Image (tube, helix red, strand yellow):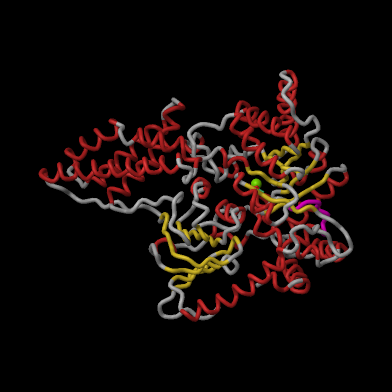
Amino acid sequence: MNKPTATEKVFQGIGVSPGVAHGKIFVYSVAEEAVPQYDINDEDVPKELNRFEQALIKTRAQLHELQRRIETGTGASVLTNIVEVHLALTEDPVLIDQVGKLLSEEKKNVDFIFHKVAQRYVQTLSTLDDEFFRERAVDVQDVCRRILRNLLGHEHRELSSLPPDTIVIAYDLAPTDTTALDRTHVLGFATDVGSHTSHTAIMARSMNLPAVVGLRDISQKVHDGQPAILDGYSGTVIVDPSPQTLFVYGQLEVKRHNVRERLAQLRDLPAETLDHHRVTLAGNIELPEDVPALKQVGAEGIGLFRTEFLYLKRPDFPSEDEQYETYAKVVREMAPHAVIIRTLDLGGDKFHSEESKVPEINPFLGFRGIRFCLGRPDIFETQLRAILRASAHGNVMVMYPMISHVGEVIQANEILEQVKASLRQKQIPFDENIQVGAMIEVPSAALTAEMIAQEVDFFSIGSNDLIQYTMAVDRVNEKVANLYEPTNPAILRLIRNTVESAHNNNIWVGVCGEMAGDPLFAPLLVGMGVDELSMGASNLPRVKEVIRRMTYQEAQELAAASLHATNGRDVLGMLQALLERVDPDLLI
Ligand code: PEP
Ligand code: MG
């Protein structure tokens, strides 16, 4: 890229979802709301109270507007329950009376007092024994942030309704934020924190939107309305681009557009190598809204439906019927292709409001995935019943996340059998031959894959977590992103062991982590014998292209050579050389 001019500013981060967006900046969140603190006089008290009252009125008006948009179908329906609770909280006497009392006692500005009261309130609720009150803590925190912004005169940021051609810049985007994102107007997003496999990145790829993460402090250095180019290929965000930069990007965009058009022709062609070895290319989704983009690129099924997104941003758990409707919709839309529904993988960096009350010190090593499911059989059984009922409408498979030993699979299967028996008894239809799979994403599972293979019909390698747990690298921490190495000899050995164990036991094996959707790594996985690759919609055409332009034999040779390499860099070099040879356009 050309040098920045005096006015344009270039921010370098990690490009995590391909594409270029050219639009106007919308700053969603900065690292912390800074709350000023100053003394006031007795006569200022009524004035400060009035400011507080005005902030509450404004907050209620915003929430009513949000409610109206949900009712008219222009707002994200996932927020329905939340808005109700938030509205009630703006009338909460505990909160309001306490602010008045403390204001008179301490004589400080009302923003400061309110912040203090709100923090105390959240703290008290989170430590109560009663589950209902603990659930309220997250809502109180959310609504208090909104009130505080109104007090401080900061405009409230609503991700569910954005101006056209928006590039969202944020300190971070929680899974709940991205769920509510207005998909019609957002062109791309960029965050201060995050890495290639953080959920912001994953979500961006599913939504087919360019994204850059790990930009460190961009959210504090830009402001609303500034024109910007977000380059999801190179990981740059250029703010106030010069005419020269716009020209260079214009040309590059023409080239990339031509490549996209060329790859779009592959939509209905098989992912088959030149010597006729075929693999299945499926898609990853977080929400039913992700399905059309996958159909558009010709995905042969859903290789990973991350169901935990149905559980976020709400105080309760989704009912069996609600889940059934959601799953059945996806299954019908994808028929006759398979839909692999992963049972909920809460924990790590995705929490239901109940769990986030008592934070764990090491959430990625904690009560996550199948551990949560087995610890909360009530929630697990409800989900299994919904999945089984949906299996009557097409080809459904069920998959368990975060398996660390075979015992967990056996226990989960027992629960599945009990749920099947109860459905049979009630004569509720489901697929008696539903396939069951285990995610292999913990090193202990990869090492004991031979044992696990005997209990399931397929494996799906979750490379995102497998790399995190094997290399001891937090997948969402940009400071250690350089250690996150998919080609490391340790990772390749674990993948090889998993594939061999699957095939020795006559079951198939897929990869649904981000490695599968990278045209650089896909040939290596194919060469190792992986049967299915599942990825976000934006990557599928590029992966199909590389598979169709290589031979299975060279992929196998590449895999064998990679397994002899003593470091990940050499493997990367071999993979880059292959891509350069088969289609260098995939590297621009
Ligand atoms: C993985 O770990 O590779 C995976 C696909 O699961 P998730 O990213 O949802 O943890
Ligand atoms: Mg995982």
In the picture shown, does residue 429 fall above or below 558? above
Q: Is residue 271 left or right of residue 514?
A: right
**Residue pictured at 59% horizontal, 32% vertical:** 322
Q: Is residue 467 visible?
A: no
In magenta segment, residue 273? no
**Quarter occupied by residue 559:** bottom right
Q: Nearer the viewer, residue 115 or 168?
A: 168
**Quarter occupied by residue 384:** top right
In the picture shown, does residue 9 fall above or below 114? below
Q: Position of residue 1 (x, y in %)?
A: 56, 78
Range of residues picked out in magenta: 527-533
Q: Is residue 131 left or right of residue 528?
A: left
Q: Is residue 522 visible?
A: yes
In the picture shown, does residue 587 fall above or below 311? below
In the picture shown, does residue 364 fall above or below 239? above
Which residue is the extreme one toward the front?
72
Q: Nearer the viewer, residue 213 or 547?
A: 547
